[in-house]
Image (spheres, rainbow, N blue to C red):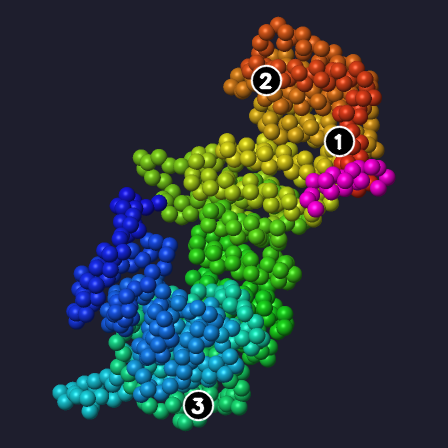
Amino acid sequence: MYSHGSESLIKQAREIQESELQKFHSRLVKLLQGKDLGHEAVDSLQRLHLILSATKYTRTLPPELQKRLQSLLSSPAEQFQVLSSAVLRETLPLSGQEANYNQENFTQLNSHAAALLLSQAGSRADVSSLCAHLLRSLDSRQSEGPANSLTHSLPILNSVLTHSPECLTADHVTLLSKKLVDWLRYASITQGGGAPSGGFFTGPRSRQPVPIAELDGTVSGDFFTVLCVGQSFTEDQWMNVYSFSMLRHWLLTYHSVSNGNNTADTATENMQGTSVSKYLSYHSSPMSCSVLSSSPANRLQLSLSLSNDDRSEVDGSVVSMLSATSSSSRLLPPKERLREKAFQYCQRLIEQSDRKAHKRTDTDLQKACLVEAVCILDCVCGEDASLVFRTFPCIKALFGRLSSDLSFARVLLPIAQFYLNHGEMAAVDCESVWTLVFRRFPAELFNDSFLAHEFLRFLRLNLESLQLRVPQYSHSFPNLLKFLAWDSPAVVDDFVDLLPSLVTAGTAVELLHTLLDLPCLSATLVLQVRSTCLPISEPGGRGLLSLDAFRNQSFRGLFLFLLRGEAGSGDTIDRLSTLHELLAETADWQRVVQCAQTAPMLLHIFFDTVIEVADEKLLAHLVQAMLERSSLLLNIPKYNKEIHRVFSCHLLRMCKLHPSLVVDQSHELLEFAGATAKVYSKEEVYTHVVWVLGEYLSASCDSRCSVRLITSCFETLEAVLFEITSSAAPPGADCPVPRVVTSLMSALAKLASRSHDLIPRVSLFLSKLRTVTRGGPVAWCSDEEDLVAIVTRGEELWSLLKAPGVAQSVLTPPPPVTTPQWHRDSNVAMPLRLRALTNLTHSQ
């Protein structure tokens, strides 16, 4: 796990003596007393962290060193903030020190200090105290603390809410809701710090406030949002960005708090889409710094121009065109006001996203903000149904604008979520939405791994609603499986959850064929991508035969069937063997091999589900498909063996649940069992087919089973057994496995016990088998131990058949014998004996 050098360092750290450790502490205290801390201080702190973390015991540092490390938490160099926080988290706080630090140094709190406080919180009361301090700092005026205290406090508070929303009280909810309303809706619309007006006489007196601009360069005529740009920003503008980043989380959190439930996990799970903060950390526009990072090294040095006035809605803040139409919202309670302002903010973001940004990074920022805005609108509409009718026109227009451009696919998914949640209430037609989501997305974006993750997550979170409200869902599996065929290791867990919902009586047979063709689909998708990237012909180069076949019009229909977007065009391909020949060279491609490894597991899930929903007619169709497809698989040896093992397992299950399947499908089963070549190539499936014929071809299982049918089955199996035991295996094939031979003998003995006229024939064969093997090795069995086992089994069956009545009761016992319940029968003495033995074995 660790390199030799790393293990040596860890060993040294664990074995350090206490006296040496105390000397090291003393040297570190002296080193940290200096004003300029350099590389030596960094190395010493790293070594101290290794010593503390290398042992399972939590250590206590000397008080002087503890204070020095605490002072480093407010160091201007983030490297020392990180190291000191990491070291202190590995130690026990001094007695009474945690509360003092919490009170005295709160004004200097940053993300690393907050991580320390949260890690050392001993109870929910400690977290509640920290939460109260954070909220009190948010409510304080600027003059009461450092300028950057707010920008540190809000992200830390968001982290507290993620883990412990129960720490909030009703007063906390009211206070933070009010502050979020002010920051979201009433931030300054001028840039922080005046910009020079130009000319020779340029100085501080001549600088005038410059208005905030839109991403297309025009002057903003409305309130400030995260999509506004400028050279520098005021603190309340930064708080606007922070507030938007945590708004959806807060809306979900205060809802759970108001109900008195601890639903932090639910709130986190419901945060769909991608947080805008992931995008903001990579862009070069003024919004491009990491807005959720509370580290000064990662933020722009702002020239703050926020006045000391308390920014409220009544004292003359900037009023926009939207606020003029919603002045009645001032009378709403804080939570309802926040929902209203969140609605206005998101409407403004959607309007801003229609502007053409000058920079590509700002275009990505627009997409990220659209995702968040639509999710917030979905959230507020879920809490207040009256907003649905105000929101749908905007969402519908946004969908119409973006639906033709798949580069906005990650924005269209939250829109689909909105339609799914509220489309029924608004009585809107969602057909175009589901056509886009279930047809174009998988067909054209199957190789977008990030979209695949979000798309499949959308399906899993809404599985029940999709099954009830979206008819296209269950018929879209040919398209959905393209995500699995392209990158099966990354999405297999999603399909383990999704596959049962795709299995219905109408889709089962086609879904079985599609799952078996997953390696072919994987190869076809690779060929589709390569055909668009590689030239049609390369002079002097060696091309792929499969790629040439993919481009050949005569084979185009085969590939188009695999690439179909919807179920219902047919169960499988007529020329499936031809397709396998064309794709023979793809059998060792990495994606194809990974897909072949995934398919057997999904087939197990498929059969487990289909047994619950299928009737006997459908199961009979599936048995027929299994027998047919056992010979029609892409030539991947391990894959074929695994599929045969799956078929064998579930063939037994289906026949055990519905023994009449053997009579219904007797023609197909006998045709399969009568092919001697399958003994050598498909011994797993062949053995189980023979077993079910011998086990369930009986009048006790199905009254339609006649003597004629039993005789026909006997003669078929007898011919195969005689053929494989009278000659050597075909060239290139191994000798038949002993299990096949013994299964054939057992099946013949079972059939003969039900039709006594057949007993002499099977007895004659078994006696000849014993005579032939006495002459030495035989050509059809190369292993002496296997031959002895086969002969022993034959002698047992021969002895049983001498007494036909006994043979039938032993080879085909009645159900009460195979499934005894004597311990439940009150008419026998077994329950009394069991109770007596229990009393004896259990101590009193």
C-alpha separation, residue under disc 1 versus residue under disc 2: 27 Å
The magenta stretch is 826-844
In the structure shown, which secondary structural element does the residue marked by tag 3 occupy?
loop
Q: Amino acid at mark 2?
A: Asp
- The image quadrant where one finds the N terminus is top left
Q: Is residue 483 above or below residue 466?
A: above
Q: Nearer the viewer, residue 52 or 326?
A: 52
Count the numbered circles shown. Answer: 3
Disc 1: CA contacts within 10 A as few (<14), some (14-19) or many (>=20)? many
Q: Earlier in the sequence, mark 1 or mark 2?
A: 1
Q: Nearer the viewer, residue 541 or 434?
A: 434
Q: Considering the whole magenta stretch, tell me its main secondary structure.
A: helix
Q: Name which residue lies at 24% across and 56% down.
A: 19
In the structure shown, which secondary structural element does the residue marked by tag 1 occupy?
helix
Residue 480, percent from left and from top: 54, 52
C-alpha separation, residue under disc 3 versus residue under disc 1: 82 Å
Q: Which mark is residue 786?
A: 2
Of the two numbered discs 1 and 2 in the rendering, the one whose residue sits closer to the viewer: 2
Q: Nearer the viewer, residue 434 or 26?
A: 26
Residue 18, percent from left and from top: 27, 56
Q: Name which residue lies at 29% across and 50% down.
A: 15
In the structure shown, which secondary structural element does the residue marked by tag 2 occupy?
helix
C-alpha separation, residue under disc 3 versus residue under disc 2: 91 Å
Q: Which mark is residue 696?
A: 1
Q: Earlier in the sequence, mark 3 or mark 2?
A: 3
Q: Which mark is residue 362?
A: none
